[in-house]
Amino acid sequence: MMSDIGIGWPMAEAPVGRVLRAGTAGFIIGCQVQQLSGPSFGCLVKAQPVDEREAIFGLIYDMNVADDPLVRRLILAESPREEVINDQRQNRLLPIEMSVLCVGYCLNGRFYHGLPPRPPLNLDPVHLCHDIPELIRFTDHLGYLRLILRAADGGVPVDQLLVAHVQDVFQLRGHDVDWAATVINEVIELLRSDYDTLVPVLEALGEALPGLADVAAVGGF
């Protein structure tokens, strides 16, 4: 689905990591420990190649902190010194990995809510989508929700991912009740034939968006 809103790229914050590997449906971000304060499960990110190829948008759905040989040795130590632990965390032999589900891209100044024509490349920087005008333009059109719900077969926890994402965007949009109500109506429509998924998603959205009685009434929970 295409959004016909033009966009000029905002000034980007420091990247939260870089692309380790990628495919059409998603990509893996590698990052350092000190870059973990910003990204979280469900947040919208953007792989923005420096050579101005199309930007690719996605949602973080998994974060993996793997071990390495030094960690294994430190685990066996009775009381590893704090400075040794801190040094290992800052100088890991392996990056922390975050898995991203692609939900859209931008090409020639327009948004598309679909899989990108080609994946990002290794070492492309990845940024959090915290520029509010850009975030609003992307999330105003809800075609990307369909891509989330179709990702269950790929091991993505779609119900929890959807709830975490909606909660995050709801806050970034300044607690936009109208947007939340529209999202709930769209989810109901998309999951109308999957009642077993719809009910827990609506219940989880009700818990994630406390105090929105009117929105809850629209969603039926």
Image: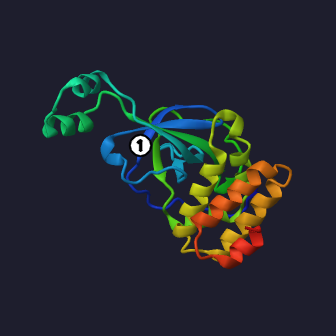
- Residue drawn at 48 percent across, 32 percent down: 122
Task: Decide if residue 80 is on the left or right side of residue 40.
Answer: left
Point out residue 63 in the picture as x, y percentages from the top left corner.
Answer: 47, 40
The quarter of the picture where residue 68 lies is: top left
Q: Residue furthest bottom?
A: 214
Task: Decide if residue 13 is on the left or right side of residue 213.
Answer: left
Question: Where is mark 1, residue-wise?
Answer: 17
Point out residue 197 in the picture as x, y percentages from the top left corner.
Answer: 74, 49
Point out residue 201 in the picture as x, y percentages from the top left corner.
Answer: 69, 56
Q: Residues within 10 Å of mark 1 (few under 14, many from 20)?
A: many
The quarter of the picture where residue 123 lies is: top left
Q: Residue furthest right?
A: 193
Q: Is residue 105 visible?
A: no
Mark 1 residue type? Gly
Above or below residue 75? Residue 179 is below
Q: Is residue 155 visible?
A: yes
Point out residue 10 in the picture as x, y percentages from the top left corner.
Answer: 49, 61
Quadrant of image for the C terminus? bottom right
- Residue drawn at 52 percent across, 67 percent down: 172
- Residue drawn at 56 percent across, 74 percent down: 175
Q: Nearer the viewer, residue 118 or 144?
A: 144
